[in-house]
Image (cartoon, rainbow, N blue to C red):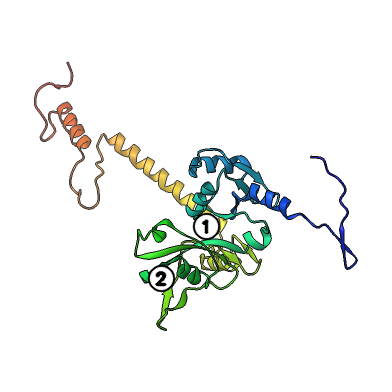
Amino acid sequence: MGLKFVAPTVVDGVSIAKLEKAEVDKMNEIWMNAVIVYVVGQNPTLTALKSFIMANWNLGNEPQMFKHEEGYFVVKMGSREGRDDVIFAGPHLFYGKPMIVKPWTASFNFHNEVLKVIPIWIKLPNLPLNCWSEDSLSRIGSLIGVPLYADECTSKALRVSFARILVEMDVTREVKKMVKIADPNGQTIVQPVLYDWLPAYCKKCNAVGHNCEAKVNRMQKVPQKQWVPKKDKVVQIQEVDEAIQKATKEDEQAKEMEAEGGWKVVTRKTKDKGKLPMYASRMIEYSNHQDPGRTGGAKGPNPYLS
């Protein structure tokens, strides 16, 4: 692209570069099918976002994508219909993170628009059907922000429970839950407003994507851990000595039982009290066979020896 010197226009002693309308309009046509994409709370790579868009947006042809150093992406679609289809399909999520998708404009400014003015889908439940015209919905949406589109079900009256429109609104201001509508007869309707999604906004940092006050409140609700000092070393040593003495005493009792040739049957203390385990009963039976003179023992030779 070869460039040339063009004499600037001087206005009140200040040099100004005056652009030609035809040239600006030609460049507007090139970028008019593009959308601005910003992932709230995450900074994905260009390759990761491209893979996500091709897998979830059903565009057919791969769009041109560019990443700006400020953290947002410019996705250039092949047609105006493809751009509108992506905008209508919102709200979008990038692996659980909300995505801001808005049409590109010549006056776009990232800090003034993406971080403050965001397109949000709103619902108007039980809105009278005679208020579903393009002009009426535009007037109602203007109470909240700048209305952009109505979805297909609203435009074709395929759903009568609520009207759904896309409104570009400033999330740094107070969100309206109710709006008032005056019909031609002078009657006033108080209309509730529901939002499909609203981004977190931090008044302290003046930024979208987090809320420091909400984070502090959550931290206060979390139970605090208390430090408990460990037992005294002397007490621990005493417990170890008692455990060794107890184990030594049990070993001595076991040796005495083995020397006497008797069996010690261990049973449960409650419901199995008085019952012999299966292995114990069999061992007693085997012992009786070896000693026929014992009470209840079997007579004759030992059947276990051939």
Q: Where residue 194 sits: x, y (%)?
A: 44, 67
Which residue, as the protein is rendered here, is positioned at the far left? 299
Q: Secondary structure at mark 1?
A: helix
- Quickly name the residue at label 1: 235
Task: Answer yes or no: is residue 96 visible.
Answer: no
Task: Answer yes or no: is residue 200 visible.
Answer: yes
Mark 2 burial class by Cα count in 10 Å: few <14, some 14-19, many 20+? some
Which residue, as the protein is rendered here, is positioned at the far front? 22
Q: Quadrant of the C terminus?
A: top left
Which residue, as the protein is rendered here, is positioned at the far top? 306
Which residue is rendered at x = 8% and y = 26% of the image? 299
Question: Quick check: 21 above or below 130?
Answer: above
Q: Is residue 251 left or right of residue 295?
A: right
Q: Where residue 136 sits: x, y (%)?
A: 45, 70
User: Tag 1: residue type?
Assistant: Val
Q: Nearer the viewer, residue 278 or 300?
A: 278
Question: Quick check: 121 above or below 291?
Answer: below
Query: Counting residues from the N terminus, which is met first, the one under dot 2 or under dot 1?
Result: 2
Question: Quick check: 236 above or below 192?
Answer: above
Which residue is rendered at x = 72% and y = 52% of the image? 22
Q: Secondary structure at mark 2?
A: helix
Tally the marks.
Answer: 2
Q: Quadrant of the N terminus?
A: top right
Q: Where residue 200 sits: x, y (%)?
A: 56, 63
Q: Quadrant of residue 260?
A: top left
Q: Quadrant of residue 294?
A: top left
- Disc assigned to residue 267: none
Q: Where residue 118 sits: x, y (%)?
A: 57, 61
Q: Nearer the viewer, residue 190 or 222?
A: 190
User: Tag 2: residue type?
Assistant: Cys
- Quickly name the residue at label 2: 131
Which residue, as the protein is rendered here, is positioned at the far bottom? 186
